[in-house]
Image (cartoon, rainbow, N blue to C red):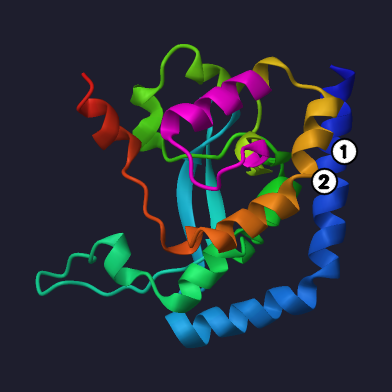
């Protein structure tokens, strides 16, 4: 209980200070995204957070709004741009999530917030990931690979939620630079993972 209070205080203070410190970079990215990708600058989407409550996640957009002749958005891989890939690989697209942390919807460290469409596809063990807030830095950042499977990701997240501690948070926090390096080395920015519901529907 004490650590949870400390964790919230750390989340708020660190996110606020970091946002202030990087404000020049933040506004430069706003301008670049507007010029290279168009409007809106931010990508917002409903995500499932702690205790299965919904909230709006905010990121810099990394894709165009190109549509087919019927007016439907083209597949993600066709709307991805070189600049968008750079934003994802460098994790710069996630900077607006600091606003979600300040608001209290997210934490600095925690499971990746995912869309509600995935809610019916978790195992009982994987549902433990919702005992804590979703985070900017995921527990799987300690893995040696930037791209892992859904099962591996959820294993990290369920174990993190079940063993919440300062030591674990520090271990994950100090791996943040490693995961950014890994993403650049593996072309993470252009990687598109198959949706969870598609993968698990085949297993049913």
Vertical comparison of 104 with 159: above or below: below
Q: Is residue 97 magenta?
A: no
Q: Quadrant of the C terminus?
A: top left
SS assignment at label 1? helix
Magenta segment, prevailing SS (helix, strand or loop): helix
Q: Which residue is drawn at 63% across and 65% down?
A: 92
Vertical comparison of 98 with 92: above or below: above
Q: Give the range drawn in magenta.
A: 141-160
Instruction: Provide residue 160's location: percent of width, then percent of height.
Output: 67, 24
The label number, if any, that marks residue 91 in the structure image: none
Q: Which residue is drawn at 32% across and 41% down?
A: 195
The label number, if any, that marks residue 9 in the structure image: 1
> Which residue has dot 2 on it?
12
Q: How crowded is mark 2: few (under 14 residues within 10 Å), some or many (20 or more)?
A: many
Q: How crowded is mark 1: few (under 14 residues within 10 Å), some or many (20 or more)?
A: few
Vertical comparison of 175 with 67: above or below: above
Instruction: Provide residue 193's location: percent of width, then percent of height.
Output: 37, 47
Instruction: Provide residue 47's location: percent of width, then percent of height.
Output: 48, 41
Quadrant in the rendering for residue 91: bottom right
Residue 124 visible (yes or no): yes
Q: Does the magenta stretch include residue 157?
A: yes
Residue 204 in the figure: left or right of residue 70: right
Say how many tags the image has.
2
State how far apart marks 2 and 1 are (Cα).
5 Å
Residue 93 visible (yes or no): no
Residue 3 in the figure: left or right of residue 125: right
Q: Which residue is drawn at 87% across and 41% down?
A: 10
Does the residue at mark 2 contact the one at mark 1 (Cβ under 8 Å)? Answer: yes
Considering every residue shown, the one lying at the far top of the view is 124
């Amino acid at each position: 209980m004490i650590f949870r209070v400390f964790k919230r205080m750390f989340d708020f203070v660190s996110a606020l200070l970091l946002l202030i410190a990087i404000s020049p970079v933040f506004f430069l990215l706003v301008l670049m995204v507007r010029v290279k990708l168009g409007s809106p600058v931010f990508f917002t989407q409903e995500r499932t957070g702690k205790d299965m409550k919904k909230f709006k996640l905010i990121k810099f957009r990394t894709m165009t709004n190109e549509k087919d002749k019927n007016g439907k958005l083209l597949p993600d891989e066709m709307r991805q741009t070189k600049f968008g890939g750079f934003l994802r690989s460098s994790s710069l697209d996630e900077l607006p999530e600091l606003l979600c942390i300040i608001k209290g919807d997210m934490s600095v460290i925690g499971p990746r917030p995912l869309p509600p469409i995935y809610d019916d596809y978790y195992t009982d063990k994987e549902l433990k990931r919702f005992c804590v807030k979703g985070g900017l830095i995921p527990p799987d950042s300690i893995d040696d690979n930037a791209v892992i499977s859904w099962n591996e990701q959820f294993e990290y997240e369920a174990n993190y939620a079940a063993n919440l501690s300062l030591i674990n948070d520090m271990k994950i926090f100090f791996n943040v630079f490693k995961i950014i390096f890994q993403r650049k080395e593996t072309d993470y920015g252009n990687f598109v993972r198959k949706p969870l519901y598609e993968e698990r529907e085949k297993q049913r």
